Image: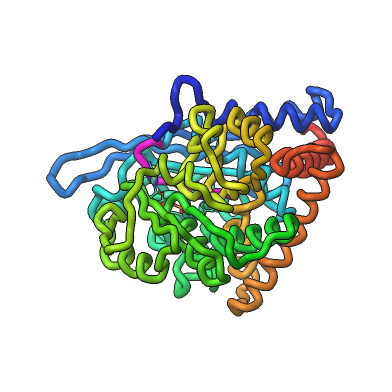
Amino acid sequence: MGRVNATYNPYDNVLRVVENAAAILGYKEDEYSTLKYPERELKVSIPVAMDNGGIQVFEGFRVQHSTTRGPAKGGVRFHPAVSHDEVKALAAWMTFKCAVVNIPYGGGKGGIICDPRTLSERELHSLTSKYTAAIAPLIGPEQDIPAPDVGTNARVMAWMMDTYGMLKGHTVLSVVTGKPLGLGGIKGRGEATGRGVMITAQNILKKMNRQIAGTTVAVQGMGNVGSVTARLLHEIGMKVVAVSDVSGGVYDPDGLDIPEILAYLSQTRNALLCDYRTDSLIHLTNAELLTLDVTMLVPAALENQINGDNADQIRAEVVLEAANGPTTLQADEILEKRGIRLVPDILANAGGVVVSYFEWVQNIQELCWTEEQVNTELRNIMDVAFDEVWESAEANGKTLRMGAYLIAVKRVVEARLGRGIF
Ligand code: NAD
């Protein structure tokens, strides 16, 4: 599966989209050039005493792309393919995502090159705590607020909050979001990104005058985002015909039993779909899943999944980007020419950061929202953002991705110009 390679650099991808948007908006280089450079980048080495008695040194990053509109905000990724350029790109996408949904944050991201599936709980805890201590000078409720991403979860956020609090001498709930419910977490955060994807799926189908019933869906990735997305789309009546994880996918043209698959995956920590067997299922590769003949394709795993090599084989009518950066620029152009509608990541998967924002506000104000309040406010924000992006794309005769970037780049540049150069 292609990630960062000689021909694909996710940060270059972001820069080209930003440059295109700035040109359409008529900005001079001086007005938007700050957007091309991350404000702060930290690389850390993290020694961990392993269970086998040896020491392993891991490499980690924290990048703050922008704090122009508010503190940096963005997840922490634990994955073997993490790289500096990937973290830079992910941080930049956060800047534009927060701007599209108009919440008062900039963008940041972090990551450690590791495979969490091969680490014991104790090793993972130690790695997380040491990483948090190493990036502690950069993070904080008013500076930079981490959250879960690929390979991390509420448990990891609890460890990060604990370590930060130990260093400060008191508990600081608002330093990370996506925490467990009993530790300052907010109801609905666990499923917020998937819920936002579901709301966006409803919105795009409505614009296309399509019914929910009869819509077929393939979801790549069954982690936090993919599993909730698959469950919610199934619950509202779509036919989820294929899902996958790192080991490959399962396919049933008559529709999968999503609750049963989720129950199977939650049985053990490292359960994989390649080991899931029932009579009616067809097993397929991730590459095959992407080219299935479905109404909606939801990439919810990693970057660079739909690219110049396979974009002309995509048969979905709509690509809904639940992952960050799953489609390259080259693929964007091919999909556009082929009339395939794409809803961009900075809109489609923004539900997570929106509810993270609610969690941060809740922690700072020492309030407690009900799940209904969270979901209602989430829908309000996602609906407004969707309509704004749709109108921006229509008004400019551009794709939904460019429609979203025209809004986001304008908001960040105007904030920068309003503040002036210090
Ligand atoms: P996760 O770690 O919970 O799940 C990742 C999924 O991708 C797993 O099913 C894993 O098996 C699969 N996967 C990993 N490597 C793969 C590979 N090489 N090929 C195919 N599948 C692979 O991660 P997540 O939190 O669900 O994040 C998924 C995507 O959504 C990422 O792009 C992330 O940046 C983005 N995202 C996450 C959130 C969030 O709140 N967690 C919010 C916004 C965007």
Q: Where is 265 relative to 187, above or below? A: above
Q: Is residue 409 left or right of residue 67?
A: right
Q: Quadrant of the N terminus?
A: top left
Residue 79: say if magenta: yes
Q: Is residue 212 left or right of residue 303?
A: right
Q: Where is 293 relative to 87, above or below? A: below
- x, y (%) of residue 210? 69, 60
Q: Nearer the viewer, residue 63 or 388?
A: 388
Q: Quadrant of the C terminus?
A: top right
Residue 110: say if magenta: no
Please report the residue visible at 36 percent of the width from the left and 51 percent of the height from the top: 249
Q: Where is 352 relative to 180, above or below? A: above
**Can residue 178 be seen in this snapshot?**
no
- x, y (%) of residue 236? 57, 71
Residue sitting farthest toward the top: 6
Residue sitting farthest toward the left: 52
- x, y (%) of residue 333? 65, 30
Res. 162 image quadrant: bottom left
Q: Which residues are magenta?
A: 73-81
Please report the residue visible at 35 percent of the width from the left and 47 percent of the height from the top: 284
Q: Nearer the viewer, residue 203 or 112?
A: 203
Q: Is residue 278 left or right of residue 331?
A: left
Please report the residue visible at 69 percent of the width from the left and 56 percent of the height from the top: 204
**Can residue 33 be seen in this snapshot?**
yes
Q: Is residue 136 left or right of residue 362?
A: left
Q: Nearer the viewer, residue 184 or 304?
A: 304
- x, y (%) of residue 373? 66, 76
Res. 415 image quadrant: top right
Coloring basis for residues: rainbow
What secondary structure do most residues of the magenta stretch adopt? strand
